[in-house]
Image (spheres, grey):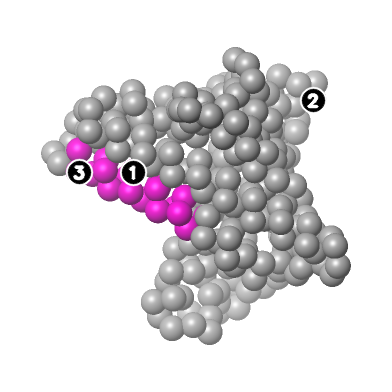
Amino acid sequence: MADIADRGARKVASSAPLRTAARAGYAVNGIVHALIGVTAISVAVGPGGEADQTGALGELAAAPGGRLLLWVIAIALFALALWQVLHALLVRGVDSKRRWAHRLGDLAKAVVYVAVGVTALTFALGSSSSAAASSQSLSARILSMPGGVALLIVVGLGVFGIGVALILRGVSRRFLKRITVPPGSLGRFVTALGVIGYSAEGVALMVVGILFWVAAATLDPTRASGLDGALRALAGVPFGEFILVVIGAGFIAYGLYSEFRARYARL
């Protein structure tokens, strides 16, 4: 039975329609990140909007034809999530610990793609969402539990750790294992976009993790926030506007890298 299931998963994962849809998922994910970057820069130079996925998708919803585009984004991200799940199930050729580490990483990515896809679907259906409110609600529920402070610190540590991992992936260029790097100057450009993009996203997530720690230390769930709250917190530190512009540019770089990834990803 396991062999039959394995063959079935490989057949689905190798199908041309799913691979095409997965590449579209990378492309629309790039659009979302680029919009987050633009919004982050607008926060640095003015009032701006919500500098996170909900803000970016909300901007699309308000644009002409935006809701149709949101349906495309949602479907593409769901397809990409499915491909990540199948890829996790088909990991081979490494020892047991590394195999499960790869699987957990792929499954975590699938969860993120599904979450953003659900948010896009929510806006496409005419509703709204707020990542900051969701983070605060989650923090409030955790703090109300026995040992909630310690658990919230662990959550913050997990988010902070993901941020560190993204920075390491960027500076070590490990992300290049997942794409076929084009030759010449184009390849160097794509690599530079990936290094900058992963590093900027990592810094932003580290700040999100720190905000969870602040919420735990102050017993105030409103101090916890998502990406938007993290970027706005950066705007309040010395040279914060400059840092925020750099991170916003980094998100735009990641968005551009994702467009190239849609073309050159090893699927």
Determine whether 71 is above or below 4 in the image.
Answer: above
Mark 1 crowdedness (10 Å alpha carbons): few <14, some 14-19, many ≥20: many
What residue is at 64 percent from the left and 51 percent from the top?
196
Q: Regarding mark 2 in the picture, which secondary structure is present there?
A: loop
Q: Label for residue 150? A: 3
Q: Position of residue 162 (x, y in %)?
A: 44, 53
Q: Label for residue 266? A: none
Determine whether 101 is above or below 82 in the image.
Answer: below
Q: Label for residue 156? A: 1
Give, as a single range, the part of the protein colored magenta: 149-166
Residue 156 lies in magenta, yes or no?
A: yes
Determine whether 7 is above or below 84 in the image.
Answer: below
What residue is at 47 percent from the left and 24 percent from the top?
236
Lateral position of residue 213 relative to residue 111, left or right:
left
Q: Note whether residue 104 is visible.
A: yes
Q: Regarding mark 3 in the picture, which secondary structure is present there?
A: helix
